[in-house]
Amino acid sequence: MTDQIDPKDMSPEQIQELMKKNCLFCGMLNGQVPVTKVYEDDICIAILDIGPANPGHTLVFPKEHAMSITEVDPKIFITVQALVAAQIKGLGVKGVSVYVAEGEAAGQKLPHASIH
């Protein structure tokens, strides 16, 4: 016999806590998953992607678990702007793509908001 709770019987807070516990990005934040960090502040973290599409491929995601980009502190976009400027200058590139997959239908693969 197991003492697991059926998700139908869980409160929204319990569901959110379960999602945090099983979230790859939250694992990165709490040190369970190793990362190459390029920036961190009280709102977000920026790490290098382990399977980069291009040199400098960076993921920026909130420290607070959020499934949707609509749930994150808008200050995260100030961080993204600064990282784009640093990449253009530091990598000597002529352009940078900024990508957000919002929802599974748009290609979001993990249940934690992120900006590539």
Image (tube, grey):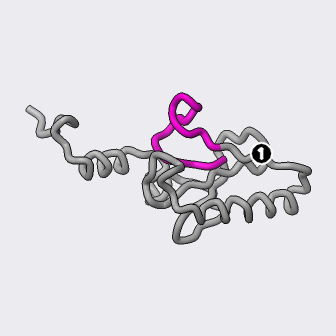
From the viewer's side, name the closer residue of 49 and 60.
60
Residue at 68%, 43% in the rendered image: 99
* Residue that protrudes farthest toward the top in the picture: 105
What secondary structure is found at the residue carrying circle 1?
Answer: loop
Residue at 51%, 36% in the rendered image: 103
In reply to whether residue 115 is colored magenta, the answer given is: yes
Q: Quadrant of residue 22?
A: top left
User: What secondary structure characterizes most of the magenta part?
Assistant: loop
Q: Is 56 left, or right, of 34 in this rendering?
A: right
Q: How many marks?
A: 1
The N terminus sits in image quarter: top left
Q: Quadrant of residue 87?
A: bottom right
Tell me residue 80's x, y (percent).
68, 59
Label 1 neighbour load within 10 Å: few <14, some 14-19, many 20+: few
In reply to whether residue 96 is colored magenta, the answer given is: no
From the viewer's side, name the closer residue of 57 and 82.
82
Q: Is 90 left, or right, of 71 in this rendering?
A: right
Tell me residue 26's x, y (percent).
44, 53
From the viewer's side, name the closer residue of 7 and 33.
7
Residue at 57%, 70% in the rendered image: 41
Q: Amino acid at mark 1?
A: Ser
Residue at 64%, 65% in the rendered image: 39
Q: Is residue 116 above or below residue 83?
A: above
Q: Which residue is mark 1?
A: 97
Magenta span covers which residues?
100-116
Tell me residue 15's x, y (percent).
28, 45
Q: Is 80 left, or right, of 67 in this rendering?
A: right
* Residue that protrudes farthest toward the left in the picture: 1
Tell me residue 69's x, y (percent).
53, 49
